[in-house]
Image: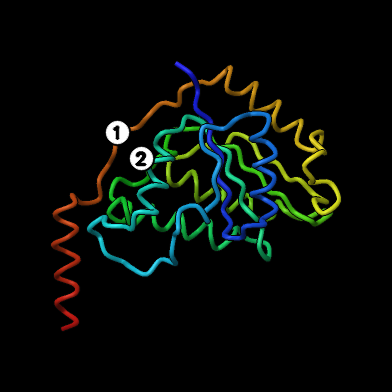
């Protein structure tokens, strides 16, 4: 069975450095999916409901995640943290999963390897968000196996400079050939979906 590797850029900017970096890598690797959050029409999260209902864009994003074996997540660093777009996407997945009812065991990237990369114009920064990004992804069941920072991208990230992303592409090529299945854990529900809906609706009633 072939290994499906997909890449996602957590930016809403059509000229995003992180999106362009993944597109350059895609020319060599040919990802199963290579998209940015622009492709999913994902609005700013605006609900705390527990019914699991989300817009079509989030459902499409979730489907692409589930149809993937290995992930490349390009997450921009914004003021020393992961991008708001990344957090927004993760929060929508939590809403879709009935507010994390299965405690990080049923997301599309749960029990799957993730390669985390940031493309940045900075000469030294770009990796300050890695600890918190890794913590969030692993809390949701993923396994971050490698991190990369690509600095000086205004000078080095352009379509003819394929050597700039050579190391990362070679790592991914090697990794997919030696992919090891990550052992899954049994989901431990906080409450059943019906129990959560009852509790949520009771809480809303108290505000009427």
| Residue closer to the observer: 99 or 57 | 57
Q: Residues within 10 Å of mark 2 (few under 14, many from 20)?
A: many
Q: Residues within 10 Å of mark 1 (few under 14, many from 20)?
A: few
**Is there CB contact under 8 Å for labels 2 and 1?**
yes
Q: Colour mode?
A: rainbow
Name the residue carrying label 1: 186
Quadrant, the N terminus = top left
Residue 104 drawn at (x, y percent): 38, 45
Residue 56 occupies quadrant: bottom left
| Residue closer to the observer: 3 or 146 | 3
Residue 48 drawn at (x, y percent): 31, 66
Residue 101 drawn at (x, y percent): 28, 50
Give the mark toward the camera: 2 or 1. Answer: 2
The mark found on residue 2 in the picture is none
Task: For mark 1, give the secondary structure.
Answer: loop
Say whether residue 143 is left or right of residue 107. Answer: right
The residue lying at 34 percent from left, 32 percent from top is: 185
The residue lying at 48 percent from left, 19 percent from top is: 2
Q: Is residue 208 above or below residue 2?
A: below
Say whether residue 11 is left or right of residue 204. Answer: right
The residue lying at 75 percent from left, 36 percent from top is: 165
Name the residue carrying label 2: 105
Task: For mark 2, give the secondary structure.
Answer: loop
Q: Sequence order check: which comes first, mark 2 or mark 1?
A: 2
Residue 208 drawn at (x, y percent): 15, 83
Say whether residue 35 is left or right of residue 93. Answer: right
Q: Residue furthest bottom?
A: 208
Tally the numbered discs.
Answer: 2
The residue lying at 58 percent from left, 53 percent from top is: 132
Say whether residue 23 is left or right of residue 47. Answer: right
From mark 2 to mark 1, how far is it between C-alphas? 8 Å
């Amino acid at each position: 069975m072939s290994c499906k590797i997909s890449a996602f850029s957590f930016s809403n900017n059509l000229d995003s450095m992180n999106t362009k970096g993944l597109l350059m890598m895609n020319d060599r690797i040919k990802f199963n999916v290579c998209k940015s959050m622009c492709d999913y029409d994902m609005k700013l999260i605006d609900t705390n409901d527990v019914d699991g209902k989300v817009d079509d864009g989030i459902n499409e994003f979730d489907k692409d995640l589930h149809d993937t074996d290995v992930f490349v997540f390009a997450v921009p660093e914004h003021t020393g943290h992961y991008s708001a777009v990344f957090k927004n996407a993760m929060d929508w997945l939590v809403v879709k999963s009935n507010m994390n009812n299965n405690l990080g065991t049923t997301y599309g990237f749960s029990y799957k390897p993730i390669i985390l990369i940031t493309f940045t114009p900075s000469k030294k920064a770009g990796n300050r968000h890695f600890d918190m990004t890794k913590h969030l992804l692993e809390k949701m069941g993923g396994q971050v196996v490698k991190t990369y920072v690509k600095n000086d991208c205004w000078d080095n990230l352009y379509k003819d400079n394929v050597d700039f992303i050579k190391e990362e592409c070679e790592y991914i090529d090697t990794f997919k050939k030696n992919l090891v299945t990550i052992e899954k854990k049994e989901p431990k529900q906080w409450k059943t979906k019906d129990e959560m809906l009852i509790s949520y609706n009771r809480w809303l009633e108290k505000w009427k």
